[in-house]
Image (tube, grey):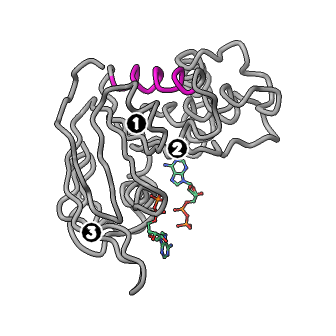
Amino acid sequence: MIEFRQVSKRYDSDHTALRQVSFELGRGELAFLTGHSGAGKSTLLKLILLMERPTAGKVVVGGQLLNTMPRRQIPYVRRHIGAVFQNHQLLFDRTVFDNVAMPLEVMGVSHQDIGRRVRAALDKVGLLSKEKMNPVQLSGGEQQRVGIARAVVNKPPVLLADEPTGNLDPELSADIMHLFEQFSQVGVTVLIASHDIALIESMNRRRLTLTQGELLSAGATMAGSPA
Ligand code: ADP
Ligand code: ADP
């Protein structure tokens, strides 16, 4: 579902973020992306989201080669990729429901389908009863779950998360990880950038480790295997 072949990313002569990175993630696979600050984790995620382009090598997502994707196609490619960020990027001037509905509104989905799909997504993250609340009224863990509902409302085959538990205590972090596992069990390919070593070890999943832009170990492919 996600394939990197000898991918390098050089921002400028002083900043090479990725060096000949190769790996493959299958359908329904859940993996962690680890490495120190500056190792290239965000850059790798940005290449998948087409927020950056590789300097060399090939990035293939869902069978599509992203390198040569024309700019006008980028919004369509992004529809197939859910993204969750540490600071969740929720809007506090609207309800939980409206936050989750945003990607569908942009796509022009009908009013009726939006209602159905938003409630299905909120149900998955256990927040159906809070759809009318403002995100401000929710706890940090609940806010992150709203961010996850928004990322999956569109049923993307790929889900990326950049430090999704950075602001959460260990118990809430484990809850969030459990949600990601549930998505992988229904076939979503999940890649989670994190440096929460204790959490990653507790999950016993494949690990992609970056050191100064090089992939140290790509782990074993364990598509579909239980935790
Ligand atoms: P991580 O997410 O692991 O902290 P990043 O991908 O953010 O790593 O950064 C990897 C390297 O690329 C760092 O040396 C960083 O300074 C550099 N870098 C990241 N973004 C840019 C940019 N827009 N311009 C120049 N250098 C960048
Ligand atoms: P730029 O105009 O600087 O290239 P982008 O269009 O790449 O910016 O991204 C704009 C904002 O949207 C960024 O803050 C980014 O984090 C966010 N973003 C990009 N792709 C997604 C996505 N698939 N899901 C959620 N947020 C996204």
Residue plotted at (22% across, 56% down) = 4
Q: Earlier in the sequence, mark 1 or mark 3?
A: 3
Q: Position of residue 107 (x, y in %)?
A: 53, 44
Disc 1 and disc 2 in contact, CB within 8 angstroms: no
Badge 2 or badge 3: first in the primary sequence: 3
Is residue 40 toward the left or the right of residue 149 in the image?
A: left
Q: Which residue is mark 3?
A: 19
Q: Is mark 3 within 8 Å of ligand 1?
A: no
Between discs 1 and 2, the one toward the N terminus = 1
Proximity of marks 1 and 3: CB atoms separated by less than 8 Å: no
Magenta highlight: main SS: helix
SS state under label 1: loop
Find numbered disc 3 in the image and state the secondary structure of the residue it sits on: strand
**Could you tell me which residue is drawn at 42 percent across and 78 percent down?**
15
The kind of residue tagged 2 is Glu
- Residue depicted at 26% across the width and 18% down the height: 226
Q: CA distance from mark 1 to mark 2?
A: 19 Å
Q: Quadrant of residue 32?
A: top left
Q: Which residue is label 2 attached to?
A: 163
Q: Which residues are magenta?
A: 173-184
Cα separation, mark 2 vs mark 3, equals 22 Å
